[in-house]
Amino acid sequence: MKTYSMFHTLKDLEKSLCDLYKKYGETFRNKDKEAANIFFGLSNEEFNHSDIIEYMRVAFTNDPVNFKELDVNLTEVERALEEVRNALLLEKPVGLEAAVRFALDLELRLSEQYNIFAVAESNPKYQKFVQISLETQEHFKKLHAFAWSRGYGKERSH
């Protein structure tokens, strides 16, 4: 996939994650304040990721000479985007354990994907992917600690 299209796909994913985590936060707002706060926090961070990606897209568009074209495989990102969009369409609220497990799986897969983007391109202009990758790893750690505290992660190890 070409770089310009890549930025649009990644921004769509981050905005969709923002919406999903906000939906989860609202779902658990009156049932579990701690869970709601975690999801609202993740939503805000995903919104920030979409801004970082938009910044990179604009920089790429305005300075294509200094940005090398990336040829990346976004199959995993596109799969995640479809899963998130499908989750947003669900009318029946998911349970907390299902929401946490789904988010854990997404964050782990996406952290790995952003690492691939960062390593695949040594151009410093793309190093913002490292920031997103590190923050996505932090999302996974927060969710994992929460899942563990609730007994959701004891049979799984990551």
Image: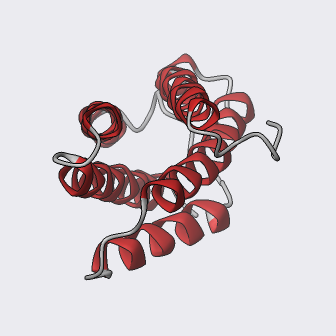
Q: Quadrant of the N terminus?
A: bottom right
Position of 27 with respect to 109 (left or right) is left
Is 21 placed above or below 151 here? below
The image position of residue 105, as x and y in percent, is 63, 52
Between residues 34 and 138, which one lies in front from this camera angle? 34
Q: Residue 113's quadrant in the figure?
A: top right
Disc tally is 0
At x 48%, y 28%, the residue is 132
At x 53%, y 35%, the residue is 143
The image position of residue 4, as x and y in percent, is 41, 55
At x 47%, y 75%, the residue is 82
Between residues 128 and 31, which one lies in front from this camera angle? 31
The image position of residue 40, as x and y in percent, is 24, 37
Position of 157 with respect to 51 (left or right) is right
Q: Quadrant of the C terminus?
A: top right
Position of 60 with respect to 152 (left or right) is left
State whether residue 29 appears in this view. Answer: yes
